[in-house]
């Protein structure tokens, strides 16, 4: 059997592995995506808008914020600055993926575009260097988000309850993630550093401008405490 004959089977094995890895994200993205879709429907936007935002923006919490920007008539500058502030964390944790994505070839542009918090958590904990696996995990997660968003928008007209406050679902996700990490972590120094640094920046810079400074403070704090954290782990 030649190598070309075995390639379809090998790709199927990789696809199966990628799907299994992505199942936890599927459970979250369908629900959170539906929340976004319902919110879009409630704001007067249809399926095409919802599909387009989830396909071409694909930014989770920024999509929730984006609805307010769209309905409020925000300027381009305001939109750009808000996007940077909301997604500033990506600038920091994506650095660790530079080496792994460096030789991804044709997959590289999409891998960069589709790197979300959840996709990062799956890929950074995978010792494999299979670029096809990286691509498929990213693609599956993206499809889950799109599917959830569209379903939520379609179902929005038929829900028998008020949708006010549904945008809090992304905040709830981050709170749940923090709680789980607090319970399972051997040291709470990173969590305490994050909370303390964020609160300090909130008091100093105010609610409109605290996000980027708090990320810088957290990175600097963890860098200074790196040797201690490595010992405790």
Image: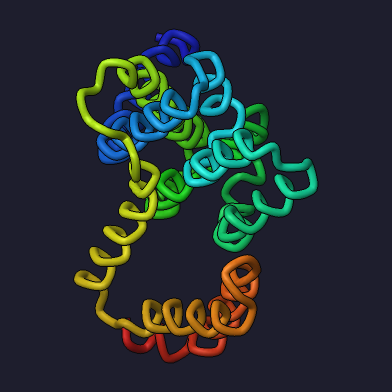
> In the picture shown, does residue 157 fall above or below 99?
above
Q: Nearer the viewer, residue 109 or 42?
A: 42
Left or right of 196: which side holds 65? right
Q: Nearer the viewer, residue 215 or 99?
A: 215
Residue drawn at the location 48% of the way across and 46% of the way down: 61
Q: Position of residue 143 (x, y in %)?
A: 43, 24
Residue drawn at the location 35% of the way across and 34% of the way down: 35
Q: Position of residue 211 (x, y in %)?
A: 59, 67
Left or right of 176: which side holds 3? right
Q: Quadrant of residue 42?
A: top left
Colour treatment of the image: rainbow
Q: Nearer the viewer, residue 144 or 167?
A: 167
Q: Nearer the viewer, residue 8 or 123?
A: 123
Instruction: Examine the rendering and report whether any part of residue 199 can be seen.
Output: yes
Instruction: Examine the rendering and report whether any part of residue 11 can be seen.
Output: no
Residue drawn at the location 38% of the way across and 32% of the way down: 33
> In the picture shown, does residue 87 fall above or below 44?
below
The quadrant of the image that shows the C terminus is bottom left
Residue drawn at the location 40% of the way across and 47% of the way down: 118
Q: Position of residue 48 (x, y in %)?
A: 54, 14
> In the picture shown, does residue 174 fall above or below 136?
below
Q: Position of residue 107 (x, y in %)?
A: 61, 30
> In the picture shown, does residue 190 fall above or below 116?
below
The quadrant of the image that shows the N terminus is top left
Left or right of 75: which side holds 101? left
């Amino acid at each position: 059997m030649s190598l070309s004959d075995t390639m379809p089977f090998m790709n199927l094995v990789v696809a199966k592995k990628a799907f299994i890895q992505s199942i936890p994200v599927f459970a979250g993205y369908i629900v959170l995506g539906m929340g976004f879709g319902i919110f879009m429907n409630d704001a007067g936007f249809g399926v095409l808008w919802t599909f387009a935002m989830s396909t071409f923006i694909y930014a989770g919490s920024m999509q929730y914020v984006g609805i307010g920007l769209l309905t409020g008539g925000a300027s381009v500058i305001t939109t750009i600055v808000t996007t940077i502030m909301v997604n500033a964390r990506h600038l920091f944790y994506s650095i660790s993926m530079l080496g792994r994505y460096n030789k991804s070839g044709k997959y590289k542009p999409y891998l960069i575009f589709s790197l979300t918090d959840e996709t990062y958590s799956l890929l950074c904990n995978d010792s494999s260097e299979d670029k096809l696996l990286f691509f498929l995990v990213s693609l599956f997660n993206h499809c889950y988000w799109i599917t959830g968003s569209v379903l939520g928008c379609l179902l929005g007209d038929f829900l028998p309850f008020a949708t006010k406050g549904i945008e809090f679902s992304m905040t709830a996700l981050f709170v749940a993630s923090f709680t789980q990490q607090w319970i399972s972590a051997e040291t709470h120094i990173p969590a305490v550093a994050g909370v303390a640094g964020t609160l300090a920046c909130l008091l100093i810079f105010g609610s409109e401008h605290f996000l980027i400074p708090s990320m810088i403070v957290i990175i600097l704090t963890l860098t200074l405490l790196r040797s201690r954290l490595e010992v405790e782990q």
